[in-house]
Image (spheres, rainbow, N blue to C red):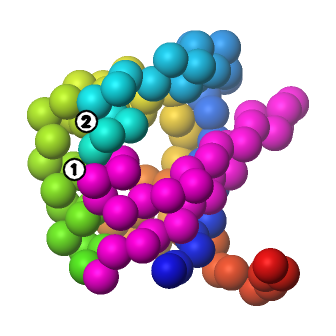
Amino acid sequence: MQRMGMVIGVQPGKVETYKELHAAVWPEILALISSCNIRNYTIFLKEPENLLFGYWEYHGTDFEADMAKMAASEKNQEWWSFCIPCQKPFETRKEGEWWAMMENVFHLD
């Protein structure tokens, strides 16, 4: 299992929209996330800075293939068409990232 954390901003005026979307995530998206070996997926919001912190645990063996499967899903592309306009990625993110991945520096079970 691999623990992963990531961060992104929320566009000004889009916080409520983002909250509403995630209060009722489509069942197809929830099933897709699970089928891509992601568990304990959580998104936290820090206001007034409007930062999102995402955490998940990856339980698969081929992360790149699972992320490609997720990206290729037509339903997920539709979901992203609503979510992405709400998000404000960091200029310092690595090439190919939307959410900026974070280094795990501490964990206690």
Residue positioned 30% across, 82% down in the render: 61
Q: Position of residue 62 (x, y in %)?
A: 25, 79
Look at the image and say whether residue 48 sits in the magenta stretch. Answer: yes
* Above-or-below relation of 109 to 80: below
Position of 77 compared to 82: left or right?
left
- The amino acid at mark 1 is Ala
- Quadrant holding the C terminus: bottom right
Residue 96: quarter of image:
bottom left
Residue positioned 83% across, 81% down in the render: 108
Residue positioned 28% across, 30% down in the render: 28
Q: Are marks 2 and 1 in contact (CB under 8 Å)?
A: yes
Position of 34 compared to 74: left or right?
right
Residue positioned 86% across, 30% down in the render: 48
- The amino acid at mark 2 is Asn
Q: Residues within 10 Å of mark 2 (few under 14, many from 20)?
A: some
Please give the residue where the numbered disc 1 appears in the rendered image. 71
Q: Position of residue 93 (x, y in %)?
A: 52, 65
Look at the image and say whether residue 51 sits in the magenta stretch. Answer: yes
* Above-or-below relation of 90 to 88: below
Q: Which mark is residue 76?
A: 2
> Mark 1: which secondary structure?
helix
Per the rendered image, the range of residues in magenta is 33-61
Going from N to C along the chain, the mark reached first, 2 or 1, is 1
Q: CA distance from mark 2 to mark 1?
A: 7 Å
* Above-or-below relation of 91 to 108: above
- Say whether residue 23 is visible: yes
